[in-house]
């Protein structure tokens, strides 16, 4: 059985990462496992524990750090976010491609630990569209929106550290591009070592 690919998806708050994940899983749910992050931020309206995030206390999150139960973690706008380790490794060994939707700090830490991980950065087509989407949520104050826009300006400095940039102008098109990029990683020689070794052995029998 082929081992799953680890894909890390980041992007500005309001870029539509969550919508992309839902579209991708709706089309190809059997191929993917979406890792659920733990966070200390409170749930937004409609979010459920164990679906969008594992909502935990600061004390519980820090206990997970001490027990090395996280692949990565970072602090963003005053709250912790992190990726539980066990689920990710189990899914990859089972042959499913695992998607981590995490912040930039965490993504770069994952790349250090898993050099073959695929890093994808999602962005709207313009800064004006980003502001429009943030305001369209109707869930945050002007102060929080301004904070997120300033944060986006800082995050833009790290876009070159990603393998690919995905412009989320059309959800269906962007989801198709994301799927194609992730699946293409199975063709890399680094992801095919077992197959390469097997065919070399077979050829040596001639």
Image (cartoon, rainbow, N blue to C red):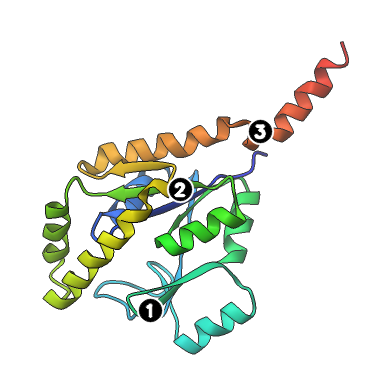
Image x and y of residue 169, in percent: 20, 43
Query: CB under 8 Å between callouts 2 and 1?
Result: no
Which mark is on residue 121?
none
| Above-or-below relation of 90 to 25 | below
Circle 1 packing at 10 Å, graded few (<14), some (14-19), many (20+), is few
Q: Residue 192 carries which label?
A: 3
In front: label 1 or label 3 = 1
Q: Few, some or many C-alpha atoms within 10 Å of disc 2 (few <14, some 14-19, many ≥20)?
A: many
Query: Which mark sits nearer the N-terminus, 1 or 3?
Result: 1
Labels 3 and 2: the sequence-earlier one: 2
Indicate the quadrant containing the N terminus: top left, top right, bottom left or bottom right.
top right
Percent of width and height locating residue 197? 77, 29
Q: Nearer the viewer, residue 37 or 131?
A: 131
Residue 79, numbered circle: 1
Give the number of marks.
3
Q: At x 38% / y 79%, what residue is drawn?
A: 79
Residue pointed to by mark 2:
119
Disc on the earlier residue, 2 or 1 = 1
- Relative depth, front residue between 55 and 196: 196
- Residue at 58% x, 55% y: name it: 112
Determine contact: label 1, label 3, CB under 8 Å: no
């Amino acid at each position: 059985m082929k081992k799953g690919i680890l894909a890390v998806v980041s992007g500005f708050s309001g870029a539509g990462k969550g919508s992309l994940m839902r579209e991708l899983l709706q089309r190809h749910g059997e191929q993917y496992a979406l890792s659920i992050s733990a966070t200390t931020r409170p749930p937004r309206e409609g979010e459920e524990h164990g679906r969008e995030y594992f909502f935990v206390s600061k004390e519980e999150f820090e206990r997970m750090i001490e027990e090395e139960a996280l692949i990565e973690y970072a602090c963003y706008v005053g709250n912790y976010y992190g990726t539980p380790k066990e689920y990710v490794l189990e899914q990859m060994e089972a042959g499913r491609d695992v998607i981590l939707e995490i912040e930039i700090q965490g993504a770069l830490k994952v790349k250090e630990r898993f050099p073959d991980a695929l890093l994808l950065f999602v962005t709207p087509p313009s800064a004006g569209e980003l502001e429009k989407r943030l305001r369209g949520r109707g869930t945050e104050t002007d102060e929080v929106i301004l904070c997120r826009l300033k944060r986006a300006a800082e995050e833009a400095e790290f876009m070159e550290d990603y393998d690919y940039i995905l412009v989320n102008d059309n959800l269906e098109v962007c989801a198709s591009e994301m799927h194609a990029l992730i699946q293409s990683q199975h063709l890399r020689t680094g992801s095919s070592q077992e197959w390469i070794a097997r065919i070399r052995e077979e050829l040596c029998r001639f």
